[in-house]
Image (tube, grey):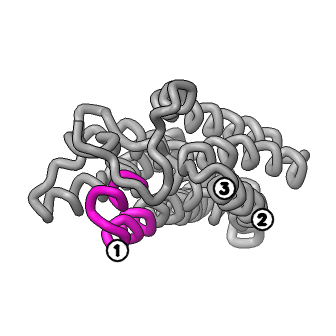
Amino acid sequence: MPVLAYILTALAAYLLGSIPFGFLVAKAKGIDIRSVGSGNIGATNAMRVLGKPAGIAVLLMDALKGFGACFLGVLIYSFYFNQFNGLHSTSESIPFPSQAGAELFATIAGIFAVLGHNYTCWLKFKGGKGIATTAGVYLALAPWALLVALVVFILAILLTKYVSVGSIAAAIALPVTVWIMTPHNLFLGLVTTALGALAIYKHKSNLQRLRAGTENRLGTKKSAK
């Protein structure tokens, strides 16, 4: 497989993931979401600042970025596989794209979609925390593991009333579940662990507020900073 295929997959997925839907939706309402609430461009802050309909819309669009990037990765893999092998194969023996190759490209695309969301080039490489985008990625890569993480996410929020606690719990549950469900897929396990660690790192300010007792609970509005 040409190196160009990997580069194109990473670049296209990053650009797709970098679309700052939370910022754009808020901007359409005349609000710079970076200067209100927690200052984050993700769905949680959008919901608090803009209301539930806008927050849900941002959530879905951010998740769609992750899912769409994985699908795009598979398309790029299939295209380059057919182009490359069509030139080097005989008419008697034409290879077919493999599931492993498609999964590899989807995983690479997922990584860069999350990085694009978290470090968007359109906002000086300051973005969101990647929870919704990661969910979209794993809807494509490992839907059953995502379901487990979603249940953990909901239970943690119900028990604590903190969205951040739910997000961190899900960031731990997802890689653990992936390792258990797909122990043969070392690359996916390592990638999921890295993305989980990144998600927790992006919640460092939430962890500080949790320790200080100043973290915003679900159902309350956060004053502008």
Q: Quadrant of residue 106?
A: bottom right
- Please identify the dominant SS of the magenta region: helix
First to last magenta residue range: 44-61
Q: Residues within 10 Å of mark 2 (few under 14, many from 20)?
A: some
In space, the residues marked 1 and 3 are separated at their CA atoms by 20 Å
Residue corresponding to mark 1: 53
Q: Residues within 10 Å of mark 1 (few under 14, many from 20)?
A: few
Image quadrant occupied by the C terminus: top left
Tell me which amino acid carries mark 2: Trp
Q: Is residue 157 left or right of residue 220?
A: right
Q: Report the residue at 49% width, 46% height from top.
A: 130
Residue corresponding to mark 2: 144
Q: Position of residue 169 (x, y in %)?
A: 69, 45
Q: Is residue 80 left or right of residue 53?
A: right
Q: Is residue 76 left or right of residue 44?
A: right
Q: Position of residue 164 (x, y in %)?
A: 54, 44
Q: Quadrant of residue 195?
A: top right
Q: Residues within 10 Å of mark 3 (few under 14, many from 20)?
A: many
User: Any magenta on residue 171?
Assistant: no
